[in-house]
Amino acid sequence: MLDLEPHGPLPRQIYWRRRALALGIAALVIGIVVAVVAVVVMNSTSNEQPTANESAAPAAEAVPPPLPGENPEVKSPIQPPAQQAPPPTPTPTAAVVPPPILKEGDDCPDSTLAVKGITNQPQYVVGDQPKFTMVVTNIGLVACQRDVGAAVLAAYVYSLDNQRLWSNLDCAPSNETLIKTFQPGEQVTTEVTWTGMGSAPNCPLPRQPIGPGTYNLVVQLGNLRSATVPFILAQPAQAPPPAPADGAPHLPVPGPVG
């Protein structure tokens, strides 16, 4: 039999206490060893199996960064496969209608005529009566006819801010018609005189004189308008003071001596 009773010169309680202390130390050492082994095993397991956040990180990194100017919050629409896309609807196209063939003697359309205005000089003085020439030219290739009478051919004066100041039809309206047959390149000229006074349709009174400045002449035939032609109205020059009747210069009168 195994003898577990302590033997020695000391009391028996001392030997039992020593055995209990040795057993406690041995149990503590075994517990520490077990804890260290458990920690090592857990660390090795966590290194072999990444967490959900770590496994999702590569997928997030696989998305390319947005280019400069792109908005990452705006999603591009998903394009359906080609076989699922509806067939394109044919767009109806309007047939191009060629211009009518102009025969000799037909009425001249606007596209075959050109109008322009001419001033008899580039600058006038307030009080002058400028003369304006209205020119209509057949720029087509076929002879045609057009009414160029005073009822439809007019001259206008505008300010530089496009304010209408005068027309030859305001105070001298006319019902005159003049059907003119134009040969290709042929011109018709009509001259009008402007008194320098302003006017409006139906010629309301009183009429005010136009002061100095720069103005534009425009000629119009129906809906066909010419380019603007600028001209100047200048202030009249100041006349020099009249000379004395006897021709002798006037001397200043001496003042009182004082």
Image (cartoon, helix red, strand yellow):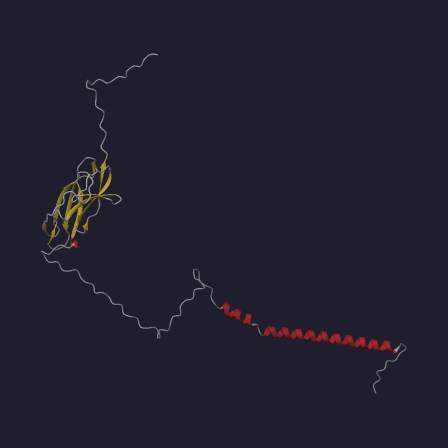
Residue 153 position, x and y percent, is 15, 48
- Which picture quadrant has residue 51? bottom right
- Which picture quadrant has residue 248? top left
Residue toward you, 41 or 204:
204
Residue most extreme to the top:
257
Residue toward you, 10 or 64:
10
| Above or below, 184 relative to 35 | above
Residue toward you, 33 or 129:
129
- Which picture quadrant has residue 49? bottom right
| Above or below, 241 relative to 236 | above
Residue most extreme to the right:
9
| Above or below, 39 relative to 128 | below
Residue most extreme to the bottom:
1
Residue positioned 16% across, 46% down in the render: 154
| Above or below, 13 relative to 189 | below
Residue positioned 83% across, 76% down in the render: 17
Residue most extreme to the front:
205
Residue 80 position, x and y percent, is 37, 72
Q: Quadrant of the image for the C terminus?
A: top left
Q: Quadrant of the image for the N terminus?
A: bottom right
Horizontal side of 175 relative to 246 (left or right) equals: left
Residue 133 position, x and y percent, is 15, 43
Total marks in image: 0
Horizontal side of 63 relative to 1 (left or right) equals: left
Horizontal side of 70 relative to 113 (left or right) equals: right
Residue 206 position, x and y percent, is 20, 38
Horizontal side of 85 relative to 190 (left or right) equals: right
